[in-house]
Image (spheres, rainbow, N blue to C red):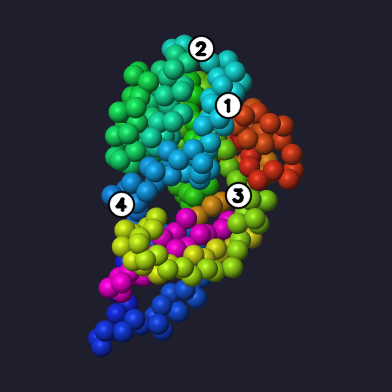
Amino acid sequence: MTSYQARNLITADGALDLVQLAALAGRRPALFEPAEPQFWTDPYIAQQMLKTHLDPDIDAASRHPAIIDATVAWIIERLGLAAGDALLDLGCGPGLYCKRFAARGLDVTGVDFSENSLRYAREHAHGTETYVLLNYLDLDYTNRFDVVTLIYGDFCPLSDAQRATLLGHIHRALKPGGHFVFDVTTPVQNRRTVIPPVWSVHKDGGFWKPGPHLMLAQVFDYPADDAILEQYIVVEADGKTTVYHNWFKAFTEETITPLLEAHGFRVAGLYNDLTGAPCTPDSPWLGIVAQKT
């Protein structure tokens, strides 16, 4: 697959090459095709992500604090976790779940590849957590944890190969009989997300760039694969053009169950979310408790 990194669309005579821009905007990427690599670790974007994580009025990077509280309480109750049990939170961000689990007496390890988010997590920790700067696709734990969590759809942007790698790492990291708790979007959510392309002008900067820029937000639907792509084409004032990809693979009970079974898990519970709401067919989310077999 080709990675579409930043390029300059200014022509030799100083004009913006609208032909190239139109071609870029009109091209439908291949399934799980990458764009700007590792953009979540970009210093500016990392700051924007942290702000979004910490804003209690934005249910985007993290859920509302009350939902986080309810999720932590439900996971502990559902699994019968006790003080000293070991929990690994993947994609922990600024530690919003980790510090709550730690406050309940669990032995908590948080993993994330954003140094900016982990700096905040360490500065605002409950005090007993361990935070590790690592891409969770490179996990290397063996029989260490009673439970592994991956919360707020982080399973969905991965390619099929990356999901297989991650499930293998999680299976190895769990103790015998340990649990993997995570949530995914369903095709219902994908259908809600598909919208027409939208151009916008950001004169004072925005989420992706600090300076003035033009942005095209597009959503591509891949219904045969239950996947969608959110693509952002950002054109800065000097013509530098960057493409960002957010992939989301949706799942149902019928598709997540065999995937988990193929990697050594059994489905121990399906819910509308990770607060334990009963599973309904029209839910945009699916909360899953899987057990290592």
Q: Which residue is mark 3?
A: 250
Which disc, if any, is residue 82? Answer: 2
Identity of the residue drawn at 40% across and 82% down: 18
- Front disc: 3 or 4: 4
| 27 relative to 255 in the view: left or right | left
Report the amino acid beneath label 4.
Answer: Tyr
Identity of the residue drawn at 42% across and 24% down: 99
| 119 relative to 35 in the view: left or right | left
Q: Is residue 229 magenta?
A: yes
Q: Nearer the viewer, residue 263 or 16?
A: 16
Label 4 secondary element: helix
Q: Which residue is mark 1?
A: 70
Between the residue at mark 1 and the residue at mark 3, the CA separation in whole angstroms equals: 24 Å
N-terminal-most mark, 4 or 2: 4
| Above or below, 23 relative to 251 | below
Q: Position of residue 198 (x, y in %)?
A: 52, 68
What is the magenta range?
224-246
Q: Which residue is mark 4?
A: 44
| Above or below, 45 relative to 177 | below
Report the amino acid beneath label 1.
Answer: Ala
Q: Image quadrant of residue 54?
A: top left
Label 2 secondary element: loop
Q: Mark yes or no: residue 32 visible.
A: yes
Q: Residue furthest right?
A: 281
Report the amino acid beneath label 3.
Answer: Ala
